[in-house]
Image: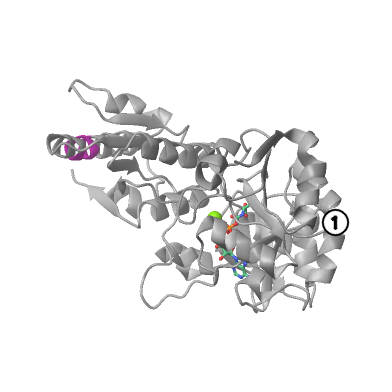
Amino acid sequence: METIVKGMEGVAQAAEIIKKGGLVAFPTETVYGLGGNALDPEASRKIYAAKGRPSDNPLIVHVSCIDEVKPLVSAFPEDAKLLMENFWPGPLTIIMPKADIVPYETTGGLETVAIRCPENKVTLEFIREAGLPIAGPSANTSGKPSPTEAEHVRHDLDGKIDMILDDGPVGIGVESTIVDLTGEVPTLLRPGAITVEDLSEVLGKKVEIDPAIIAGGVREGIHPKAPGMKYRHYAPNAKMTLVTTALLKEKDYVVTEDERTAADRQVASCIDKLVREDEAAGLRVGIICCSETRDLYNSGAERKADIKVIGHRSEPLSMTHELFRVLREFDEDKIERIYAESYSDRGVGFALMNRMRKAAGMTEILAED
Ligand code: TXA
Ligand code: MG
């Protein structure tokens, strides 16, 4: 059983553990991370072991300020400076060519390193005290939803790490945006709270989207640049299916109010039908919807399905926050099938839908008229 300490009080002890080569889970604004000394190959090996993560999947290195980046990289592109000045501390990870002191154990064998400065006071103080860059993947068992509270970390990693720095539930709830600056054009490798439009605006140029994000990283012939994107991820124990309509897809979710109402009904009645079939077969079912459609899932029938609202669909960022928590709750309640509404990919919606598609193993069906 590791120590769990709330807030600033745990910082000194956490920093000591890191200096001695141990592991500390730490809060960030996105999700909890599992930290070790990024310059120590042995600490990185321990991180992979605790998470049960394949060791070709590189770790993100966390720093407390821009100056700490210099020793970690062999080149410091002007674009990187611009992005750091605009978005750090914050939910943006930048891929740059690595310096020799960063071991291959930390970068999963790559010549590049992912660096980010998180926006959390406790963690920034912890990194400063440790005086070292902190390698930190999300603090979940590999393949499971990322932890948005200390309790999730304890659930997954109890007994496998030395300490949890607890700063309450995280603010954002979806992992940082990752942008690769080592190629000819800046490329988005993972969507997050900072959108591709935000990045383009600051850089004054187009930012490409890695095709693996759209394909989900599981289609043959597409090789994701972020190795982590190729694994099944955020996966609940239940088989999960997304439901949308042909019209919503065709119009990219930009529809009239009447069309929207009709589509909501179609999706709800399709889900209703599937739930009945599953329940008749004796399965435990969960539904993921939004406040706007919640009432459509109430009507009549004696249903047992567990209905979870993840927020307002007009605010996708708040929905990402709830998504991982709800997926964990479904696991706890031994839910075997999950049906979820699909939402728009616009803006931060891209990050939400990317995680929902991965949780569903890319399974999305169209409700019929
Ligand atoms: O919000 C976050 O980024 C959280 C918090 C803890 O900071 N961390 C996080 O780490 O999500 P993790 O390990 O779960 O995801 C890191 C992703 C993986 O998909 C990995 O493949 C990719 O970053 N990555 C890391 N280094 C890379 C590199 N050099 N080149 C390409 N992708 C890289
Ligand atoms: Mg992760």
Residue 141 appears left or right of 104: left
Figure quarter occupied by ligand 1: bottom right
**Residue 47 visible, this orientation:** yes
The quarter of the image holding the N terminus is top right
Disc 1 secondary structure class:
loop
What's the colour scheme?
Answer: one colour
Q: Main secondary structure of the magenta part?
A: helix
**Is disc 1's CB within 8 Å of ligand 1?**
no
Task: Bin the neighbour count of mark 1 within 10 Å (Cα to Cα): few under 14, some 14-19, many 20 and up.
Answer: some
Residue 142 % position (x, y)? 49, 56
Query: What amino acid is found at the position of numbered circle 1 in the picture?
Result: Gly
Residue 196 % position (x, y)? 60, 58
- Residue 96, by quadrant, is bottom right
Give the camera-side residue of 248 and 21: 21
107 shown above or below 202:
below
267 shown above or below 176:
above
The quarter of the image holding the C terminus is top left
Residue at horizontal 47 percent and vertical 32 percent from the top: 311
Q: Which residues are magenta?
A: 269-274
**Residue 166 visible, this orientation:** no
105 shown above or below 354:
below
**Residue occupied by mark 1:** 131
Number of numbered callouts drawn: 1
Query: Magenta includes 136?
Result: no
Residue 359 appears left or right of 81: left
Query: Magenta includes 270?
Result: yes
Residue 46 % position (x, y)? 62, 61
Give the camera-side residue of 255 and 89: 89
Residue 267 appears left or right of 361: left
Residue 204 % position (x, y)? 71, 64
Give the camera-side residue of 37 and 90: 37
Residue at horizontal 81 percent and vertical 53 percent from the top: 64
